[in-house]
Structure formats: structure tokens, C-alpha cells
Image: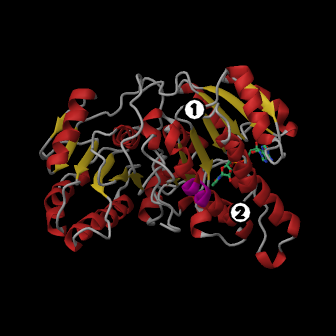
Amino acid sequence: MSSDTYLNLVNSGFTGKLAKQLGLPQPTPLRRFTPGQPLLEGPVLVLGGPSADELAHLLSADWDLDVHRHATPETRYSTVVLGLTDLTHPSSLGAPVLELSGVLKKLARGGRVVTVSRAARTEDAPAVAAARQGVDGFLRSIAKELRGGATANGLVLAETVPVTAPSVVGALRFFLSTRSAFVDGQLLAVDSSAGSLPSSWDRPLEGRVAVVTGAARGIGESIADTLARDGATVVAVDVPAAGEQLVAVANRVRGTALQLDVTAPDAGTRILEHTVTRHGRIDIVVHNAGITRDKLLANMAPDKWDSVLAVNIASQLAINEALLASDDFSDAPRIVSLASTSGIAGNRGQSNYAASKGGVIGMVRATAPLLEAVGGTANAVAPGFIETEMTARIPAVTRQVARRLNSLQQGGQPVDVAETVAFLASPAAGGIAGRVLRVCGQNLVGQ
Ligand code: NAD
């Protein structure tokens, strides 16, 4: 994996000052989660209408945070939460937003801004829909303004979902914490009140059994580590050629290894058989195995097109079919699939990859309703530029540019994707279904 030399240089004395004088990007090293870390360091400002009262209660009574209801000058807030579910006209956005404006310059490094609002619908009164949709535009803009590793993300609740619903609480906690370090400028929909709060926020996956494909290295390896840290028993899957690395990962997380090419016709049955025989159940499947075979379409050989589609999407469809037909995959199961920002925005030279990753997004949308009856969900995570062996193969100059093309001005780490996967796999995320959450630092493409 390549390291980001520019990020290191900019954060050291003289070269940092020079970069500033020249108006060059100034990425801040992101603070990431370590067990035992407090949820927030510093006071939280909660602004907005009636829903802000409920949010303030959650943050102070349940999570023991130092909550302020009005901005006090000179206070350095770690976080600002805006409760905006009651907006009826765009003019009502002004008061909370301008109060936020007064404290933004003093927001702590790595600070957080989180909006909680409602989805605009065609049946809304035009003024209500305008106010709701206005929150989206506002949120995406302040995410682009924040510096110092701070992020802004929003929760967009369906009409019947209260702010106390498990997925609102779980997603709010995820956005506030360092687990979401590289998630920026995103609006995550909460569709229902399904899901349940974990008995421990430190080990929300305790007792759950998770399968991770492509787990021998890169993002998949980090997903295996992160799910195990959160309490899950992990089955690590990868091709036989990666067998040695795979066994090392499985041993480290105290799980088991399954050498399997996910394109094998019997892959689904073999995953079910191995997991249920060894661990008694199967609750979470993370479709992470993926390949790139980049070529301009004009130069695309059939095998490059076919292999990318086979590994990145056809295998997931076939494995899901086996899972959905099995009684063993029926206790609030979770499917989390790796998409990519290329599948949303497109990318020159990646028509095969983008078709497969766009396919993943369509697949989870259509799979989610099939799991609803058993309290299950299917969602996708779309990474932007993540520092792995896959991206280390990109030519050096293109790689340098690609890293800076997001609001945090740096590439993400595999763990950033892994934390997001772990959140979507958790019991609290049961009300989020068929959605795509981007882990891209608010990549400029397709945003
Ligand atoms: P990687 O190449 O480092 O690791 C992929 C793993 O999948 C490897 O261990 C490989 O052996 C395994 N694999 C490949 N084909 C397989 C098969 N047929 N059966 C079983 N295992 C197989 O890639 P990564 O960067 O860690 O990416 C992981 C996922 O994230 C992929 O789906 C990728 O498309 C997606 N993604 C990555 C980035 C990024 O910036 N790295 C961005 C967007 C999406």
C-alpha cells in the first residue's frame, strides 16, 4: 500500500507553512476509533425545534454528554446537532443555521455537524418540501466548507420514523464518533423504526456470525478485524491462491477460513454449509471480493468485461439467492455489499467495473424488500479513493490528484470502509434498507 507523503509533509513545520502560502490543499490527519475512546471530547450544541429537545435528552441522559441548547461565545464545541424534522417553510431554517454559523469558526478539530431532518415528498405542501430539500443542499455545502478533519452528515427520516428510532440513534452515534472519520457530506435515509439498540455499544455484534468475502487483504481484511472487534464470529473467504494470508486473518480474528472462489456455481451452498456447520448460524454476509480490469471500452477484451461482472456482481446475486432460500439466514440477517463511487458517477476506463458496481446498488435496492419479513436488510457501501493495493496500482500522478478530490483532501483507509460496514451490519441499523452509504470524504464526483 502506498503512503500519502504529501499529507505527512503538509503536517510538518516548514513545508506545512509553505503549502498554506501557496494555497495548496491542507489535509488534516483524521482521528480514528480505538476501543475505550470517549464518544466525544468537548461539549455538544443541539439546535432546532421540538425534535432537538428529544435529541438533547438522548445525548445528555443516555450518553452522558455535555449538551448546550444555546450557543455560548468562546465555547469550542466538538459537535453541533441540528434537529430539523419540524420544518414547514424554508424561512424556518434560518434561525438554527445562523446560530450554527456563529460557532463554526471555533468548531474543534475533527468536529462534527449532524442534521436530522425529514425526506421531502411529492405529496408534501410545496413549502414543506422546499424546507426539507433545502436541508440537503445546505448540508452538502457546509461539508465542503469545514476544515480541520471536521465532517457534516445528515439523517433523513421517513415520515413515520421518530427521532428515537433505533436506526436514528445508531446512525447518529456513528456520525458523531470517529468511526465515521472518512464519511462526509452524506445524507443517510432511515426508512423505518425496525432494528434494536445493542446491549453494548462497544460490542454491538456479540453473538452474531459474519461471512466476509475477499478477506485476505485490503478492505476485506479490515472488515474481518472490525466485525470481530465488535463481537462477531468471522468466516473469512478468499481464493485458494490467497490461502496463506487468509488463514493468518482468520486466526487473528479467531474465526475460520474458507478457501473459495465466489464465482463458483456452488459458492452460496458452500458458504452456508461451512458457516452453519462450524458456527451454528449465519447472520451477516459482506460481499467485499472485487476486481478491476480497467480498459477504455474501445479496447475492452471480452474476458476483461466478463470477469469483472462475474466477480463483482453475478457472484453476489447467486450467493444471495442461496441465502434467501435458506432458513438459516432468517434472524434479522444483514447483507452489506461493496459498491464504489465509480458505480454512481462513472469513471473513464472503468465501464466494466462501473456497470458491476452500479449493479450492486440496484441489487441491494431490490433485495431489501425480500428480507423485510425476517427483519433483515441489504445495503451497499460505496468507497471513494481508499489506500489499498488496488489503488496503489494507479499511476503516481493520477493517484496524487485522486486523493485530493474530496472535502477531506486525502484518501481513506480500509478501516473507514470497515467501520461503515460494521455499522450497517449492526442491530441498530435495521431501519436502513436498500440504501447506499458513501465512504469517500465527499468525493467531488457524482456528489
Ligand atoms: P484488493 O484487491 O486489495 O482485495 C480484494 C480481495 O478480494 C483479494 O483478497 C482477492 O483475492 C479477493 N478476491 C478477488 N476475486 C475473488 C474471488 N473470485 N473469490 C474470492 N475472493 C476474491 O481490493 P480492495 O481495495 O480491498 O477492495 C475491496 C472491495 O472494495 C472491492 O469490491 C472493491 O471493488 C471495493 N472498492 C475499493 C476501492 C478502493 O479505493 N480500494 C474503492 C471503491 C470500491
- Which residue is at a point 48% across and 45% down the rendered structure image? 29
Say if 28 sits above or below 329 in the image.
Answer: below
- Which residue is at a point 61% across and 56% down the rendered structure image? 363
Counting residues from the start of the chain, the first of labels 1 and 2 encountered is 1
Residue that carries the numbered disc 2 in the rendered image: 353
Q: Is mark 2 within 8 Å of ligand 1?
A: yes
- Dot label at residue 349: none
Instruction: Please provide percent x and percent y for residue 115.
Output: 29, 52
Q: CA gap, disc 1 to disc 2?
A: 26 Å
Say if 366 sits above or below 302 in the image.
Answer: above
Residue 340, picture quadrant: bottom right
Residue span colored magenta: 361-366
Asked whether residue 64 appears in the rendered view, the answer is no
* Residue at disc 1, secondary structure: helix
Asked whether residue 106 appears in the rendered view, the answer is yes
Q: What type is the residue that disc 2 sits on?
A: Tyr
Number of residues whose C-alpha sits closer than 10 Å to that of mark 1, classed few (under 14), some (14–19) or many (20 or more): many
In the drawing, does residue 384 fall left or right of residue 75? right
Say if 359 sits above or below 282 in the image.
Answer: below
Q: Nearer the viewer, residue 298 or 157?
A: 157
Image quarter of the N terminus: top right
- Which residue is at a point 47% across and 25% down the rendered structure image? 35
Determine the main secondary structure of the stretch shown in magenta: helix
Q: What type is the residue that disc 1 sits on?
A: Thr
Instruction: Please provide percent x and percent y for residue 433.
Output: 48, 49
- Dot label at residue 226: 1
| 351 falls in the magenta region | no
Instruction: Please provide percent x and percent y for residue 47.
Output: 18, 49
Number of residues whose C-alpha sits closer than 10 Å to that of mark 2, classed few (under 14), some (14–19) or many (20 or more): many
Instruction: Please provide percent x and percent y for residue 293.
Output: 79, 61
In the drawing, does residue 244 fall left or right of residue 403? right
